[in-house]
Image (cartoon, rainbow, N blue to C red):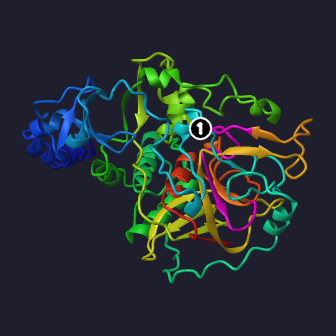
Amino acid sequence: MKSALLTSISLSLALSVALSQPVAAQGAYGGYGGQPILVAPDGAILDYVPEAGQVVISRDQMGRRTLLDHYGNLIATEMRGDAYRPNDGYASRPQAPYPAAPRYDDQANGAVRDYRQFRDGDPADVTSGIPRDGAIERLPLDADGGFMDDSQQEAALEPSQPALPQPNLVPRTNQQVISVTKKPEAEIVALQVYLDRQGISPGVIDGHLGDNVNKAVAAWQEMSGETLDPNNSEDIMQRLSYSGGLPIVDYTITPADAAGPYVASIPEDYAHKAQLPAMSFTSTTEALAERFHMDEGYLKALNPNADFTVPGTTIKVVVPGEPKTGEVVRIVADKSREQVFAYGSDGKLVSAYPATIGSSDTPSPTGTHTVQRIALNPGYTYNPKINFQQGSNDKILQIPPGPNGPVGTVWIALSKPTYGIHGTPEPSKIGKTNSHGCIRLTNWDATELAKMVKPGTVVEFVD
């Protein structure tokens, strides 16, 4: 009871502060300008500001602040007056499955294309990413994403040049971590959500204790310099009240959620994969689980009687953190911990992610390398003469982009030929199974990291 009361009081205070700016700005929306306004789902501008206790503050996929009622229904979205077009609204436009991706200059930063542009017919980048099964040798690509000729391939496979000098950064330190005791599932979820909101990923949120949770607690302590007692549920709930409110809320499935696009299934045979229009999600539950950083099985268990295919269905989902922003100048891939650490120019930890890094059969690189280029939502090129033999396939195959592609939604190419950091179609296995030499993250973690790095970012592999 005391915990619930503290949470309620803290959340009310946070909402009061959060709403203070729109209250002042709403009265001046007539001229719009650059001031924030509150826009209802039908496109109308609200002529009032809801009381702080009547709404829950959240953010949408575009990072805009939203006001929800206590049933999870959208009341209004805060928008800049000078960017709002009253005649088009916004609720009718389907949301992209991922936040908008930046467009980098092809020559300066490597070719990068937005997933939404792929859906509109613009072919996505093709990378020689690591498949879920097979050898690590792959056909290199030239700067434009095409196949290299023999002489180019020979040059590309020469030993990599020495990496750029590492910044003078503060080394990671080992800190004592309080062991997490056996806790109810809801309390474990609350801890996972809090860590996720802090930019320290626990992997999929599933209500289960494991190494990914313990590693995230240790990384949070490194980042904050504080000690976190993961067994103090009252403290965790109070912290949550200041970082987005309750860990689990109601969400109403929209027509866009139910519509997809989805594919019936993802075949194992690469020739069949290549015939699909996209390596899309297979169901609403898979898409929503990834959006909310949840294990798909946990999402279903949390809503045992829900029909996820019907728009208007209200379900329970967790409220994960907004993507971290900033500049990452150094990445440390810790093989023994199976964790990736991202550092800023000041030497401080920006974010950390559970990872699958190499295996005994196909080990990851050693030493220091750099980011060479970044591709969002990449395709995958299968070449049986260089990759591996998959089934009876003996021809080069182009597997289309999508979250269920062999490298997920992101490919961060490294200066070490054929190696990279990438996403995965199986987020629940991150940190629990071997990869084929590369660094595998969940799609949402890989996307977050990709938007904080650039060509030249140092990547260090440590044992």
Taking the spot 62% from the left edge, 27% from the top edge, the residue there is 282
Number of callouts in the render?
1
| Residue position marked by numbered label 1 in the rendering | 122
Residue 298 x, y percent position in the rendering: 53, 34
In the picture shown, does residue 70 fall above or below 16? above
Q: Is residue 178 visible?
A: no
| Dominant secondary structure of the residues highlighted in magenta in the image | loop
Q: Say which quarter of the image contains residue 37.
A: top left
Residue range in magenta is 399-418
Amino acid bearing label 1: Asp
> Where residue 316 sits in the image (x, y, percent)?
41, 29
> 85 or 231: nearer the eye?
85
Residue at coordinates 84% horizontally, 59% vertically from top-left? 361
Q: Is 352 within the magenta?
A: no
Vertical arrangement, residue 392 with respect to residue 17, above or below: above
Q: Is residue 316 above or below residue 9?
A: above
